[in-house]
Amino acid sequence: MPCSRLGACPSLPEVEALALDLRGRLDGRAITRVHIAAFSALKTYDPALSAIEGTLVDDVRRHGKFLDIEASGLHLVLHLARAGWVRWKDEVPALPPRPSTKSTLAVRVVLDERDGLTPGLDITEAGTKKSLALYLVRDPLDVPGIASLGPDPLTEDFTQERLAGILAEAGRKQIKGVLRHQGTIAGIGNAYSDEILHAARMPPYKPADGLSEEEPDHALHRDPADPRRRRRALPRARRERD
């Protein structure tokens, strides 16, 4: 069965790329069913999961490392943790998945039929530690992890001055820990913080308030020679054909 693996999402660039990809795939599509194969993944009970069945997808957005599928006023919010994957299926099985400790499948989102095919999303999680989380809420801020997020570094108002202020306020804390803290800056994980510090030529244990005036700009991954000071392009979501 054809399948596109849209990417593992430990950090902001991958989740942003995944949101963009899914926005194109899901725009105007109807969600007909949501099957839970790993009950530990579902973190909410009100509204009931059945409330989103039959709704039309309006948008797909990102909040930090959370993926938000908005459909008719409801939000299906997903956090992939360390080992989560989203796989696009051109056609999903007609029968609901059975819960099994031997399967990596956690959630299946079934879409409306088109051209004789019923596509969907298989959300899987490998490994023994299960941290993947699914929420159905009326407002994204009903998800505690989203409500406590710090500013998003991909927004236009996340300037050099704002970053410098955040780092100064963090004091002698190690800069890697400051970058990774979701309540301080949203979306940066372990791997991406390493990439940022490597590109900026900073040691991870450097005190946050010990940066020179130029270093916060380097940490933003910007090209000083570009007068528009644009951020580097996000990496594309990885895809594999099975």
Image: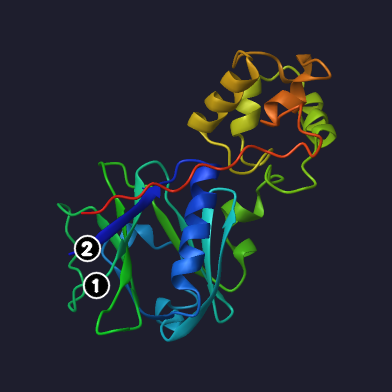
Lower sequence index among marks 1 and 2: 2
On screen, residue 198 above or below 13: above
Residue for badge 2:
2
Identify which amino acid the numbered label 2 is placed on. Answer: Pro
Question: In terms of depth relative to the viewer, which is nearer, 80 or 38?
Answer: 80
* Label total for image: 2
Question: In terms of depth relative to the viewer, which is nearer, 41 or 193?
Answer: 193
Which quadrant holds the N terminus? bottom left
Number of other residues with Cα within 10 Å of mark 1, as a class: few under 14, some 14 to 19, many 20 or more: some
On screen, residue 182 above or below 116: above
Which element type, helix, strand or loop, lies under badge 2? loop
Identify the residue at horizontal 20%, vertical 63% (top origin). 99
Number of other residues with Cα within 10 Å of mark 2, as a class: few under 14, some 14 to 19, many 20 or more: few
Identify the residue at horizontal 81%, vertical 28% (top origin). 164
Tell me where residue 122 appears, x and y as whole percent.
30, 62
Identify the residue at horizontal 64%, vertical 62% (top origin). 141
Could you tell whether 34 is left or right of 77 in the image?
left
Tell me where residue 39 appears, x and y as whole percent.
31, 62
Could you tell whether 129 is left or right of 50 in the image?
left
On screen, residue 10 above or below 60: above
Mark 1 and mark 2 residues within 8 Å of each other at the beta carbon: yes
Could you tell whether 179 is left or right of 158 in the image?
left
Residue 181, labelled with which disc?
Answer: none
In the figure, residue 82 lies in which quadrant? top left
Which quadrant holds the C terminus? bottom left
Tell me where residue 140 appears, x and y as whole percent.
60, 64
In the figure, residue 53 lies in which quadrant? bottom left
Question: In terms of depth relative to the viewer, which is nearer, 75 or 142?
Answer: 75
Residue for badge 1:
91
Identify the residue at horizontal 80%, vertical 46% (top origin). 157
Could you tell whether 192 is left or right of 129 in the image?
right
Identify which amino acid the numbered label 1 is placed on. Answer: Glu
